[in-house]
Image (cartoon, rainbow, N blue to C red):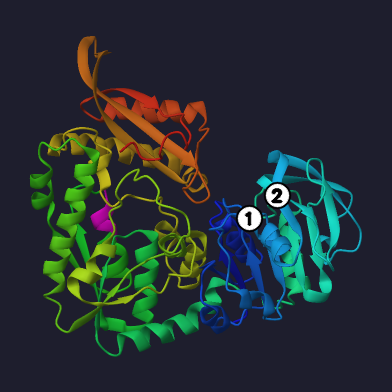
Amino acid sequence: MDQILILDFGSQYTQLIARRLRSLRVYCEILPFSAPIEDILARSPRGIILSGGPSSVYDKAAPKPDPAVFNLGVPVLGVCYGMQLLAREYGGGVSKATKREYGFSKLKILKGSRLFKGISGTVNVWMSHGDEVKKVPPGFHVTARADGSDISAMENPALNLYALQFHPEVHHTEHGAKMIENFARGVCGYKERWTPASFLKDSIAEIKKQAAGKAVICGLSGGVDSSVAAVLAHKAIGNKLNCIFVDTGVLRHGDRERMTEVFKKKFGYSLKIVDASALFLGRLKGVTSPEKKRKIIGHTFIEVFDREAKKVKGAAHLLQGTLYPDVIESVSVKGPSAVIKSHHNVGGLPAKMKLGLIEPLRYFFKDEVRELGRSLKIPESVLMLHPFPGPGLAIRVLGDVTPDRLKILREADRVMREEIQKAGWYSKIWQAFCVLLPVRSVGVMGDERSYEYTIAVRCVSSVDGMTADWSRLPHDLLQKISSRIVSEVRGVNRVVYDVTSKPPATIEWE
């Protein structure tokens, strides 16, 4: 399949370039800047995009691609650092900017560039750079100038080289998607209209080939990713797929029942439900540290799953719903980042269990997985489920995790979800949940003094979960949620609404 290849130099926006291309129905993949030329050639790219990055091209340790990248005969687009790299590579001048540019800038488009076809005059663009091109290389000419940067775009059509100092991939840049489309379709000649469904036939064939007639096990959580992966695999290998669902005791109301209804009754899969709730809750007793909770749940899950997987005769492979952002991050060129919190993932299983790994969704983003799921006739009730953390309600019960406190939170969460679904808000929100706070407060219920727990309601809007803003729910809806929780859930006399964005907060409280 034709594709545009993105080489990642560490920009925070690299994934946005891929998302823009995919939204334009242009298939693309991301590789680290250091990818061997053999890996690049194996993909037969129609064009290459050099991303931005935090380095300076004149530093001794500045990241550079294999020099052969510039001699492949395919169009190359350099963005920010990528532009400075092209300038330096071809004999131009790059140095520290007199004034660093971060944020909006007015771009004056000059005539004659294929990148700006259908765009003219002055547009707002998003800048983020401390260096700039001071002198264009021989054979290049300037195609746009901005307020603080005299050379904001340049190109050499004879060599099929194009460069932008600003970021067309961010939504702040006017006509940015059009510029990227002009490169992909106009300059590179990409003709196909790629869709996730177009991968179906090849994906099914690949799963069959990888499974090679052996049994495959799947840790089915009921979330979007594992559900789509399971349905896709079942189409490929039928009853050779063995799904295992572990009830950890920290699930939401109805989660276990939904698994039986959808995957056992509707799809007729081989599904084993393992009730390990007593084991999980026993190990969580008295634990209040969120990091310890995550690790206990992660390790216990692996232990239970490992034990159950060994009971599957002839099991040779593990199916996972790994998505493309996870793959990208695993080969990121960025330096070590601070650990915000551990992530519970079945990803620790393959090394321990010595199973072959099948990851049919490893080149898809979340919204593309949902689109693929629709082509597989998976119910919207599954596809549009909000993200649910692996540690479940254990990290939404702040403090000690006990059966009584889990019951309070589970009921409050059920009520909240019922109300936002009835009001038509569920599909407008990225994630909605309740948190049980380790705080009691005085209240008056039935003319009597009460001293009960507080529930925090958290609803956020997001595109990818990397950043998020609190959802502006109607006051009437918030009032109904609060009223029902206080009236129906014993042990709660106060409800608060979290109005903090990410950053500075995370979406989950723990």
Give the vertical position of 322 relative to 53 (above or below): below
Q: Of all residues shown, which one is farthest toward the front?
A: 60
Q: Quarter-wise, where is residue 270 in the image?
A: bottom left
* Tag of residue 351: none
> Residues in magenta?
252-258
Q: Position of residue 141 (x, y in %)?
A: 86, 62
Nearer-N-terminus badge (1/2): 1
Q: What type is the residue that disc 2 sits on?
A: Ser
Q: Quarter-wise, where is residue 74 in the image?
A: bottom right
Q: Of all residues shown, which one is farthest toward the right?
A: 111
Q: Looking at this view, is 194 or 12 the one in front?
A: 12
Residue at left 60%, top 82%? 44
Q: Secondary structure at mark 2?
A: strand
Residue 435 among magenta residues:
no
Query: Would residue 487 be found to the left or right of residue 92 on screen?
Result: left
* Tag of residue 95: 2
Q: Secondary structure at mark 1?
A: loop
Give the vertical position of 497 relative to 471 (above or below): above
Q: Which residue is mark 1?
A: 58
Residue at left 40%, top 35%? 458
Q: Residues within 10 Å of mark 2 (few under 14, many from 20)?
A: some
Q: Looking at this view, is 112 or 257 the one in front?
A: 112
Residue 253 among magenta residues:
yes
